[in-house]
Image (spheres, rainbow, N blue to C red):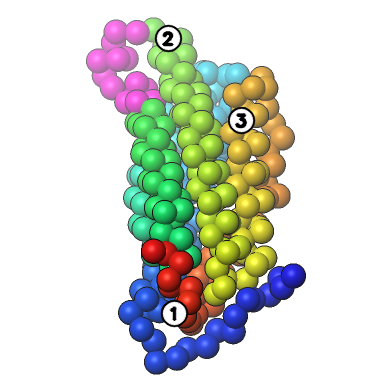
């Protein structure tokens, strides 16, 4: 089994399909890179950094003290959701020559996931609104406001974790397409499938197991990084070939 590449990265005269795949590879790779910073800032620095599990008061006070950063994190996460849609289209274009129907399914699952992610982020908007809205401050006690804010944080995590199952299916389909493609290294497809299973395990685990903390994706996310590297370094130079292109019909 070839774990390096099924075809050489020959750059012939280039037909329309080759040009589309190469351009989409660059767009997809750049999109994935661009979402790294706001995603890490929004989830690790802002949400996890300001939240004290089980302590609504400490969490609320931390968010109020860093309201500007919290809002910036929310904006960054919305940007990630938009980039997810762009990346979904780019990856569809990259893998459409392999199998159009499966590529469409992969596109659909990532776009729907992006929509679920937006719903999750909206819970964070409600959190900052609850803690800063003068009307809410006048109508509820401090303890009630803090409790509502914590419920919003929990809702964000619950909705996002559920949505990650959709993202897992997207990666599984993408891994299948990459594995089948003659112009993508076999290893990329295998690692994407592993990443998909990692997200699926974590998503299902948070639903079935109380206080789930395994976080399989800390290890399996490598496939996503490898995909970025291939898109930017190799995808922009691949030749799909006439035989491969016929598989999409």
SS at mark 3 in the image: helix
- Please give the name of the residue rendered at 60% of the width and 42% of the height, measured from the top-left corner: 199
Q: Where is residue 85 in the image (x, y as percent from the top left)?
A: 36, 52
Q: Mark 1 points at which residue?
A: 242
Viewer-closest of 57 and 166: 166
Dot 2 corresponds to which residue? Answer: 144
Q: On screen, 11 above or below 209?
A: below
Q: Please tell me how crowded label 2 is: few (under 14), some (14-19), or many (20+) other residues with Cα within 10 Å.
A: some
Q: Which residue lies furthest to the right in this view?
A: 1
Distance CA(mark 1)–CA(mark 2): 64 Å
Q: Is residue 61 magenta?
A: no
Towards the viewer: 8 or 49: 8
Classify residue 120 by image quadrant.
top left
Farthest bottom residue in view: 13
Tag shown at residue 153: none
Where in the figure is residue 118, as x and y percent of width and height?
Answer: 36, 37
Mark 3 nearby-residue class (10 Å; few <14, some 14–19, many ≥20): some
Which sits earlier in the primary sequence, circle 1 or circle 2?
A: 2
Q: How crowded is mark 1: few (under 14 residues within 10 Å), some or many (20 or more)?
A: few
**Image position of 211 (left or right of 101):** right
* Earlier-in-chain disc, 3 versus 2: 2
Local secondary structure at mark 1: helix
Magenta residues, start to end: 126-140
Mark with earlier residue (3, 1) = 3
Provide the residue designation for mark 3: 204
Residue 55 at x, y percent in the picture? 58, 19
Closer to the eye: label 3 or 1: 1
Q: Is residue 144 above or below residue 208?
A: above
Labels in figure, total = 3
């Amino acid at each position: 089994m070839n774990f390096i590449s099924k075809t050489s990265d020959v750059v012939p005269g280039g037909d329309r399909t080759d040009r589309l795949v190469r351009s989409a590879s660059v767009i997809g790779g750049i999109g994935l890179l661009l979402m790294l910073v706001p995603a890490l800032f929004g989830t690790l620095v802002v949400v996890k950094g300001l939240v004290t599990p089980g302590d609504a008061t400490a969490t609320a006070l931390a968010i109020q003290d860093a309201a500007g950063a919290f809002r910036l994190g929310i904006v960054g996460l919305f940007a990630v959701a938009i980039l997810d849609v762009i990346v979904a289209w780019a990856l569809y274009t990259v893998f459409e020559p392999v199998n159009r129907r499966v590529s469409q399914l992969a596109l659909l699952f990532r776009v729907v996931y992006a929509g679920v992610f937006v719903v999750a982020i909206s819970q964070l908007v409600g959190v900052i609104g609850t803690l800063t809205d003068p009307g809410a401050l006048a109508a509820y006690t401090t303890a009630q406001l803090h409790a509502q804010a914590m419920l919003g944080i929990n809702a964000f995590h619950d909705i996002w974790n559920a949505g990650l199952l959709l993202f897992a299916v997207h990666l599984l389909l993408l891994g299948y397409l990459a594995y089948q493609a003659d112009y993508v290294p076999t290893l990329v497809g295998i690692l994407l499938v592993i990443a998909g299973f990692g997200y699926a395990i974590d998503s299902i685990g948070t639903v079935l197991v109380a206080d789930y903390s395994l976080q399989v994706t800390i290890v399996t996310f490598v496939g996503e990084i490898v995909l970025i590297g291939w898109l930017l370094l190799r995808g922009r130079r691949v030749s799909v070939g006439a035989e491969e292109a016929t598989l999409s019909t």
